[in-house]
Image: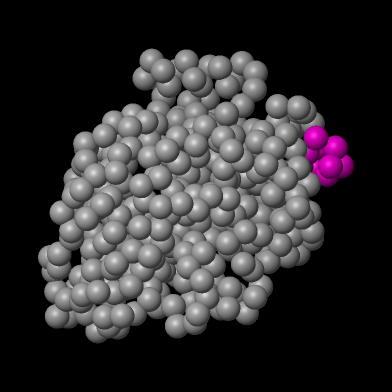
Amino acid sequence: MRALTWHGEQDVRIDEVPRPEIANPTDAIIEITATAICGSDLHLYNGIMPGMREGDVLGHEPMGTVVEVGDEVETLEVGDRVVVPFTISCGSCWFCGEDMYSLCDNTNPNAELIRKEMGHSPAGLFGFSHMLGGYAGGQAEYLRVPHADVSPITVDSDLPDEQVLFLSDIFPTGYMAAENAEIEDGDTVAVWGCGPVGQFAIQSAWMFGANQVVAIDRVSERLDMASSHGDAEAINFEHEDVYDRLMAMTGGRGPDRCIDAVGTEAHGTGVGSVSDRLKQGVGLEDDRPYVLREAIKACRKGGTLSIPGVYTGDVDGIPFGSLMNKALTVKTGQTHVQRYLDPLMEKIEAGEIDPSFVVTHQASLEDGPALYETFNDKDDDCIKVMLTP
């Protein structure tokens, strides 16, 4: 089959690879009808995430049609149309029983690799590092789905792929970010990063009762989308000081809730941003925590910091004294996607949200390598890429 594969830093290719087969009786095989390039894929593309191997099949935002099921699969049948979450969860461990699906104990076969770094292993992920299982991803014609009774959601309506595809990751991720922020009626919510996850965090903040949502980025088309579609007030951090503007907007108190939808490859201005890049370049830190520092400084006392942005390792210069003395609550984590599939599908079916608004580029799988470059460079007003094998 054809698939997008990783061959090193900024080297993604379309290759012929073996078509997946049933490996365990709880597996299903999906023929992909739509898949997407995620901002998290850019961490792989730019060589930030350790544990990649040449030829790895990329992609963790797939949907398609079931073409084969293992003998023990009970909830899916051949012909079912499904969306597949990026988190692989067994459904039977303690964490899955507590609806913390991204912390599954049983789906990372390389758990010992990441335990040495993090103390414990989260769940396996599709199309990601071998530290998180090394599972083949969904930017391909076919995908093997382990624990198929647990992960996919069946699409019973005739909604087009582009309206339901993002249940695989970015809609639940933005929604969980807003939920973790503990938004209350009347709150001011500041969202750093207006890529697709940030856009859904903005949409979700309104659902949780925010009175004011502020979008922070430097890319004009992202800020335009946040303003025009998300009704957010925009701050371009290259044109004005974020802290000063947020203080002015909130009477000096600061936003009640802050969401870091950027993660490891944050950009910023001034000495702090330059220092992060230098330290990262010589191996003194893994991630660039510019946004984390700014959000901690700006968040009001007693507020909440929610972090859906992906971090991969060590960060430096976090103002922990500020975080502690301001009594901030911090919530983060990979998304427990399965927890949100049914309620968010209901919102789509009810017309409360049409997630396809983020799609700016639709193309074939063969166009994937070029669109990785376009997406990474933020050229051609590219915000979200959807691919059809």
Q: Is residue 169 left or right of residue 352?
A: left
Q: Which residue corresponds to the image point at 62% horizontal and 67% vertical from the top-left? A: 354
Percent x, y for residue 371?
A: 45, 41
Which quadrant of the rendered structure holds the N terminus?
bottom left
Q: Is residue 284 visible?
A: yes
Extent of the magenta region: 245-256
Name the residue nearer the viewer: 199 or 36.
Answer: 36
Name the residue nearer the viewer: 276 or 12.
Answer: 12
Q: Is residue 32 left or right of residue 247?
A: left
Which quadrant of the rendered structure holds the C terminus?
bottom left
Q: Is residue 215 above or below residue 230?
A: above
Q: Where on the picture, by quarter, is residue 241? A: top right
Percent x, y for residue 263?
A: 50, 39
Q: Which residue corresponds to the image point at 50% horizontal and 37% vertical from the top-left? A: 374
Q: Which residue corresponds to the image point at 15% horizontal and 68% vertical from the top-left? A: 22
Q: Is residue 184 above or below residue 213?
A: below
Q: Is residue 39 above or below residue 315?
A: below
Q: Is residue 185 left or right of residue 203?
A: right
Q: Which residue corresponds to the image point at 65% horizontal and 36% vertical from the top-left? A: 219
Does the magenta segment cover residue 49? no
Q: Where on the picture, by quarter, is residue 327? A: top right
Name the residue nearer the viewer: 180 or 232.
Answer: 232
Percent x, y for residue 283?
A: 36, 19
Q: Is residue 24 above or below residue 47?
A: below
Q: Where on the picture, by quarter, is residue 117? A: top left
